[in-house]
Image (spheres, grey):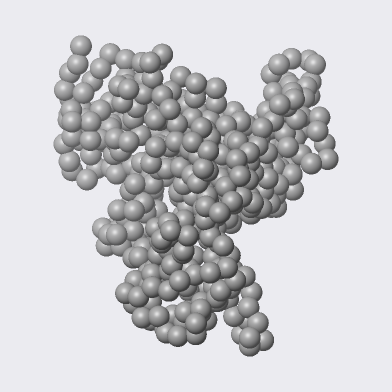
Amino acid sequence: METIRIASTKSGKRLPYVVTDNPPRGGMKYTYFAPDRSYVIQFYNNPADADYNTRSRIEAIIGRYNPTLSEAKGGAIGTDESLAAYWARRYCWPSDIIVSPEFGIVCPAYPKNFFFDSAASDVLNLFGKDKKSNWFTSSNRKFLHKAELGDFRSALACAVLLARSVRRLHQAGLAHSDLSNNNVLIDPTSGDSCIIDIDSLVVPGLYPPEVAGTRGYIAPEVVATMELDRRDPRRVYPSAKTDLHALAVLIYEYLFYRHPLIGPKINSGISAEEDDRNSLGKNALFIEHPTDSSNRPKTLSAGVESAGFLLQKLFERAFIDGLHTPSLRPSALEWERGLVRSFELLQKCGNRSCERKWFINDSSICPFCGHDNSGENIILSFHNDVHSNPGEYRKIFSTVAADNTPLFCWHFSPGIIPDEKTDRTLTAYIIRHGEDWFLVNSRLHGLVSPEGKILPPGRACRLYDGCTLLSANGVLIDVKI
């Protein structure tokens, strides 16, 4: 039986919502949808949980810490309408406080692409269920249609957006405290991601964490001290540093469909609970540890090296150096930049039966299926001039280019790292005609062709193995075919 009721908000709105017998219920809140499902109303399971600190936290989150609301409208400092719209796609951020019939929050509904449609699975009735990460990163994958699964390229895109979203939180001094497969939605068909359950954000020095986290994503130092009294100074609570552990776990799961710490090693014979606590806490060990194979599964396909050199080093820092030393974990910004640079190295696998379809071109051999993709792409290497030593160039990054590969401002300006603020107007592009490759200049001024002549906008030049181009910003471009 469904009933329409009205909720009154702090901003003075009267919002209808549909009351159902068994609303979706989480650990802290239960949810009702708007009649048109454009927003949700969430009330606390235990009204006592909505104490003064909780109310103060939510007011701050909805107001001065809100990146989905422009500064002019009371949101985060430095946020204009364009940035607010961008972040509104990356977070399901609370938009208002319910004051009647009881305390609660209003959140926008997830975008439609984060819900399964009726064709998602022949085995399970997934219609209308949200796309939590574990549907795509565990054995649950076998229940989904292939069209839902995405590929390595879309998984990498999900990881880029997640790292960017966490970086934005951390730059504002916030921590999520419960990043997990339950609180991050992904859509592998489009490479999209969205962080949810924002109302439990940790604001250091103001609002302490309310939750410890979710099994498998809680940092080892938090797991190892959970049994201590809350007043014990040795007990570790969620923070930006513990977010970085969860972020690395999620990225690893997106790319490899397995958990980085859950392996065959037994760390306690007392009970399954004690073993689990040790395996994810004080005795946590990376399943791909290079010198300690005691937690390595018997079958381990496509290790971290298959993600390319940049990401391999980040994973090793996260799960070896920083596993038990939080200060050594890669920051969200480092993950974002490493993922973006790795995205530039993606190459489409020519094997039509390759499950992952794309791979990082550290070599022309696809690490997922073994197919040799030689001759299918060219590689552009971008070098920045060293101001202290004129005539000397330092490599910035490389891009794998296929037919119709676009190039943007960050390829020709060494100081630009693509993020949410970056201009994405087409600057140039690569095309292939028969066996020949060409660069077409769309809007660059001062670009010097391999022949040493200025290549004006609207014109193209032929590329050949070993040739170089030079941008007006001093970026040298080497071509390998």
> Where residue 105 appears, x then y in whole percent?
31, 36
Where is the N terminus found, in terms of image quarters? top left
Viewer-nearest residue: 153 or 12: 153
Residue at the spot 48% in from the left edge and 74% down from the top edge: 413
**Left or right of 245 in this view: 378:** left
Could you tell me how many numbered marks the image carries?
0
Asked if 253 appears above or below 120 in the picture, the reply is: below
Residue at the spot 63% in from the left edge and 86% down from the top edge: 391
Viewer-nearest residue: 367 or 384: 367
Asked if 414 appears above or below 364 in the picture, the reply is: below
Where is the C terminus found, in terms of image quarters? bottom right
Residue at the spot 47% in from the left edge and 79% down from the top edge: 449
Residue at the spot 65% in from the left edge and 82% down from the top edge: 392
> Where residue 181 appears, x then y in whole percent?
50, 32
Q: Is residue 52 visible in this depiction of the protein?
A: no
**Left or right of 108 in this view: 465:** right
Viewer-nearest residue: 282 or 62: 282
> Where residue 282 appears, x then y in whole percent?
75, 34
